[in-house]
Image: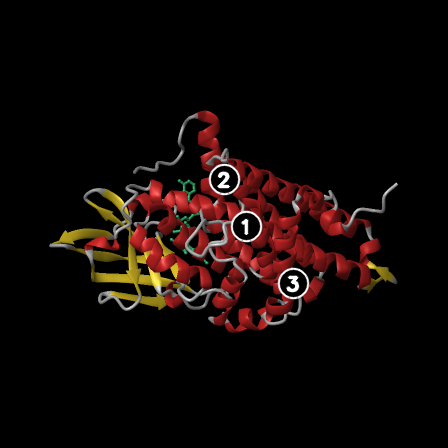
Amino acid sequence: MSATPSPTDFLAIDRLLSEEERLIRDTVRSFVTDKILPEIAGWFERGEVPRELAKELGALGLLGMHLEGYGCAGTNAVSYGLACLELEAGDTGVRSFVSVQGSLAMFPIRRYGSEEQKREWLPRMATGEVIGCFGLTEPDFGSNPAGMRTSARRDGPDWLLDGTKMWITNGGIADLAVVWARTEDGVRGFLVPRGTPGFSTRDIERKLSLRASVTSELILEGCRLPGDAVLPEVRGMRGPLSCLNEARHGIVWGAMGAARACFESALDYAKTRVQFDRPIGGFQLTQAKLADMLVELSKGTLLALHLGRMKDQGTLRSEQVSLGKLNNVREALGIARSARTILGANGVTLEYPVIRHMNNLESVLTYEGTSEIHTLILGQALTGMSAFSQSD
Ligand SMILES: Cc1cc2nc3c(=O)[nH]c(=O)nc-3n(C[C@H](O)[C@H](O)[C@H](O)COP(=O)(O)OP(=O)(O)OC[C@H]3O[C@@H](n4cnc5c(N)ncnc54)[C@H](O)[C@@H]3O)c2cc1C
């Protein structure tokens, strides 16, 4: 008989990974232990994230790591997922930074950009010298981005952009915004460098979630861009939706990182906190909570790995990513809430990671498609009928 399974790898998922995947996972885990965990409570409390972090993440090869060429690491999707999991075990804000940079800002340039655009931006984005953001959501169009009002029209050889984007991760610190705008030719993507006249940003204050992440408004008022600022290879909502699909795959993994951190914290606490003369982990109610957390953490991690393998095989469909995002974020939030109860009063302080993860996961439940929208995507896949409309 082998030894009792480890609580954080109960199903021996580790054995399903290649040596290279394990190496990448361990490298990111060490980085999180050394550089993120000692600082994160302070960053969260003060609502800040140091800019140098971008270069450190770049030096590790984590920015655009699943993209090929132009200075990107070119790993497989599972490695990228494992990195997201480990980063989010540190904090969702750090994982969000990497997701936005790699999947939402670099991916559209790599997939839909001209050769010049790729050469100009991708190598510097891979090192973290240039920070990117992704502007799709607007004040009046969140779940229904196809209704966007931001417009781009031709003015001689140039483009003129007008509109407002809202809730944009990294907006205030970005050197380059990928902005999606309505044109007479359908929705198109534009590369808007910081400092372009008519383009400004305003940070959103007083967030109680994702505090170690900058979230901003992008304001475009007669913002003039050269004719070659448009991404040439895509038209329509297919462009931004394909980016979201990339990023959602990272979230499927990342959510399990936040869940694992909460589970570990609760398990540790349950073994040491004594009430009624014995550790609270000895009470059946606490054991039931821990067992449920273990079941969902193990299932969610297996699901992430399965979807990652499908992505690497090129067979993963967006509805399947929706299933993963819906399940793993919902279950991660459930695990965080349950862990919070095990920690009692200590569970509401930043001395422990749990309430920070719990608050962060509230944003993850909403961004990149709310849980309701992913439910409706599955409903549509099952019935062939859309309960929400999404036009191109
Ligand atoms: C911290 C954070 C960072 C973000 N980063 C980015 C970013 O980098 N770039 C970007 O473009 N966006 C970003 N977003 C925006 C995010 O994608 C949107 O918040 C999300 O799409 C939901 O839009 P909304 O907030 O306007 O909610 P709404 O769309 O107004 O939805 C409100 C509620 O109504 C429900 N609802 C809406 N339509 C339906 C329907 N048809 N049927 C049933 N229920 C429905 C929703 O599920 C939700 O519960 C970020 C958001 C947050 C919180």
Query: Which of 36/211 is in front?
Result: 36
Nearest-to-viewer mark from 3 and 2: 3
Q: What residue is pinned by disc 3?
A: 30
Q: Quadrant of residue 229?
A: bottom left
Q: What residue is pinned by disc 1?
A: 80
- Residue at 59% x, 43% y: name it: 304
What amino acid does circle 1 point to?
Tyr
Contact between marks 3 and 2 (CB within 8 A): the answer is: no
Q: Is residue 65 above or below residue 381?
A: below
Q: Residues within 10 Å of mark 1 (few under 14, many from 20)?
A: many
Q: Is residue 390 above or below residue 225?
A: above
- CA–CA distance in space, label 3 to label 2: 30 Å
Upstream in sequence: badge 3 or badge 1: 3
Q: 323 left or right of 154?
A: right
Q: What residue is pinned by disc 2?
A: 322
- Residue at 21% x, 52% y: name it: 152
- Secondary structure type for disc 3: helix
Residue 195: horizontal and vertical position, in percent?
Answer: 28, 69
Upstream in sequence: badge 1 or badge 2: 1
- Secondary structure type for disc 2: helix
Residue 358: horizontal and vertical position, in percent?
Answer: 59, 57
Q: Residues within 10 Å of mark 2 (few under 14, many from 20)?
A: many
- Secondary structure type for disc 1: helix
What amino acid does circle 3 point to?
Ser
Upstream in sequence: badge 3 or badge 2: 3
Query: Which of 65/290 is in front?
Result: 65
Q: Is residue 225 above or below residue 75?
A: below
